Amino acid sequence: MKAEIINIGDEILIGQISNTNAVWIAEQFNLLGIPIARMTTVADKEQDILDAVEAAFEKHDLIIMTGGLGPTKDDITKKTLVDYFQTELIFNQEVYDRLNGWFTSRGRVFSEVNQTQCYVPANCKVLMNNWGTAPGMLFEKKGKFLASLPGVPYEMINLMSHHMIPFIKAHFNLPPLVHRSFNIEGIPESDLMKTIESWEDQLPPTVKLAYLPSAGIVKLRMSSLNEDGQAEKLILAEAEKLHTIIGDEIFGYEEETLESTIKELLVNRNLTLTAAESCTGGYLAHKLTSIPGISSVFPGSFVTYDYWVKTDILGVKKTTLEKYGAVSREVVIEMALAAKAKLKTDYAIALSGIAGPGGGTPEKPVGTVWIAWATPTEVLAKRFEFPADRAGNIHRSYQKSLSILRKLILGLPLKKELWEKDE
Amino acid sequence: MKAEIINIGDEILIGQISNTNAVWIAEQFNLLGIPIARMTTVADKEQDILDAVEAAFEKHDLIIMTGGLGPTKDDITKKTLVDYFQTELIFNQEVYDRLNGWFTSRGRVFSEVNQTQCYVPANCKVLMNNWGTAPGMLFEKKGKFLASLPGVPYEMINLMSHHMIPFIKAHFNLPPLVHRSFNIEGIPESDLMKTIESWEDQLPPTVKLAYLPSAGIVKLRMSSLNEDGQAEKLILAEAEKLHTIIGDEIFGYEEETLESTIKELLVNRNLTLTAAESCTGGYLAHKLTSIPGISSVFPGSFVTYDYWVKTDILGVKKTTLEKYGAVSREVVIEMALAAKAKLKTDYAIALSGIAGPGGGTPEKPVGTVWIAWATPTEVLAKRFEFPADRAGNIHRSYQKSLSILRKLILGLPLKKELWEKDE
């Protein structure tokens, strides 16, 4: 069984928006164990849509289409599908009632243009859209299926989650896949491969391992067919072995992020954290505060860009700044200790560096970042040289700061070489 | 003339990464005036690649392929293209010399595997890749062209910018397009259409107008064919008329963002800015500090999540907090004034609200955000109710805060209704 995603929309073809719908659908299908063989994006043009649908039905069993379902004349997907499936539009009372209520409850007029959305192809199964105005449509053709969904991500996600994924699970004989993902920071993919090579080699043939790297993080994913009901147990056993090799480096599982992990650690231990950010300019605070409920463990933080803000507002000694410069072990240590004292927290992170593009020197090139961690009992600092652009250096600084904070909270050993380079 | 983008990569088809290469290429082609008729993503499988290339050559004149050019056995694009174009691999001395230097200068071994990259199809034009190891390849077939580029975005962008775009401009008889974009915050697309309807109706037929909306921002783009050399003048004249209608709402042009605009305004006027962020948790500071050179006008800022941080660190009165609550006009006004005084800036922004998902009440539902602006002469505050999720509410808060700050710095009138709702 193979699937295809067809996205319809001029805004994708002119580079105005990124095709996030394709990413989301692909991720879901990957977890379901259904390979996406092709993704195709075409314009809101009848012939282009027809060609794409024909080519998809020729080779694939399940087609998810998004876009072109709005009520305006630009949106021609429904009309095109009516032609393709040689059917006609019929009035659907259920859609009418829902849309009527939808517009009325919002104090809006249920206009003639919007009423066209109550007409649906006669031979499709209507997927009721409780999250917007355009209903989804599911067509069958010789045992193959095509679903046409709105292009609005929120509506598409809900229609997939509530209608299509349950349908797919019920209708297709899907491989009963069991997954387990391990999220690792700070080990490049190639080093990780070497480190866990012997474990990987002894994996049972039914367990597949995937390396899913992305800027600074590698997600290791084990997948196994659960035909005998033993896959979960098997994966757990292998996970235990993996933990004996690189357990300390696994910061989370599945969709967990560094910041969600840190939040859980702090909440569970009744500990608090603050930050004093120079080169990261608030990015660390932003990432932490993107997690709901962080406020109970993160009272606030400082962005101290300017020299005098580091001294007068935070409390770094002027002599330290003058002697060592803002990007130095001494200054980040004072920043971390001052932030921790001022905000009365258990932990504090301080960052100071040269994010770029300007400001680099031979001794402190662009990408040089000092990070300090103040803990309840000590303060540590480490110099990094990140190789990226401004945004990348800021991102890597945040990753490193939380990744190492996690080890400090858990009392895990820090790799010796990590600290020796500067000492 | 029509173009197609073919991206090769399993990591796209499993939803691991977003196809940013397609977005970037599509944007460039749109500016060049070349329509992208289709985007296709296929796996690193010979037959799938062959099918995609054949289908593309059938209908389109120019094909940009990315991905699958690495030296490992997974990467089969080069081999597949050799088969498709019925050619053979030949040794290329220039590529060898460059790669040899590349590896040597990095202290790395120029391994046998990497040396396979010096073999290129006999009938292609080699596009020297000075930014990585895999050379690009340009093939011709009956007056149509296919370029195969590495999938690493940085390398692809450089090969496009330095080789392919100049080639396309030189080889194809491109429409001499002139563009001008106007970036607008705070007017929904439908309202904007009504506001500028009469201007749009009188546009010369040679000037095309595009609405390019994205979360809270609408980019209006005029494009015109410059066949008589007059397009630039024509667009400038129309831009002037547009300015008389909505000039105050245009915060920038082309790729300018709210934060780059604010930085320029502050730098040019020798003014400074700070912030006290509660619900946005550092996001505003992060957006500002993503602009290189902001440090001269943005000394730093506060993230004041907790009640007592607002009082003890920033200086909000305890009685104000107790009487009005953290999400109130009174508190954001005190936050803005305190931040401005502490950091000795000309302007300060303060934000406090309920980003969600929890914390809402009937009086202050999720999405309620109070923003205050302290200027050299006054302090203003406004309540917003954003309809989005946590990330969306944080994003809209940042947009509104900078959009209105811009008007305050420029002394532009604030829409009256904007302030009356709460007063």
Image: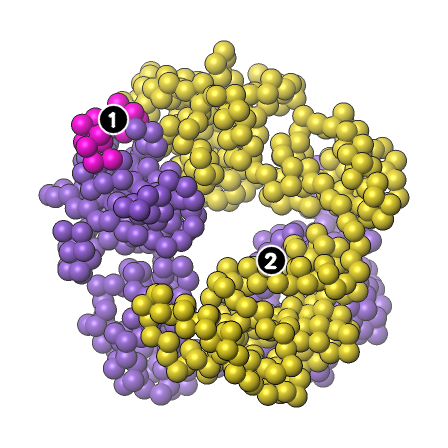
Chain colours: A purple, B yellow
- Chain label for disc 2: B
Whether label 1 touches label 2, CB < 8 Å: no
Instruction: Provide the major secondary structure of the magenta segment.
Output: helix
Q: What is the crowding at mark 2: few (fewer than 14 residues within 10 Å), some, or many (at least 20)?
A: few
> For the magenta stretch, what is the residue range?
A308-325
**Foreground: B137 or B151?**
B137
> What percent of the width, then of the height, locates residue A338?
20, 32
Regarding residue B102, the answer to whether it shows in the image is yes
* Residue A118 in picture, x, y percent from top left: 78, 56
User: Residue placed at 83% from the left, 33% from the top?
Assistant: B199
Image quarter in which the N terminus of chain A is found: bottom right
Q: Report if residue B304 is visible in the image.
A: no
Residue identified by numbered label 2? B161
Q: Residues within 10 Å of mark 1 (few under 14, many from 20)?
A: some
Instruction: Determine the CA span between mark 1 and mark 2.
Output: 45 Å
Q: Which numbered tag is attached to residue A278?
A: none
Residue A183's place in the image compared with B419, above or below, is below
Q: Residue at x 15, y 56 (%)?
A: A420
User: Looking at the rendered structure, which numbered label has been put on residue A311?
Assistant: 1
Name the residue type under label 2.
Answer: Ser
| Figure quadrant of residue B222 | top right
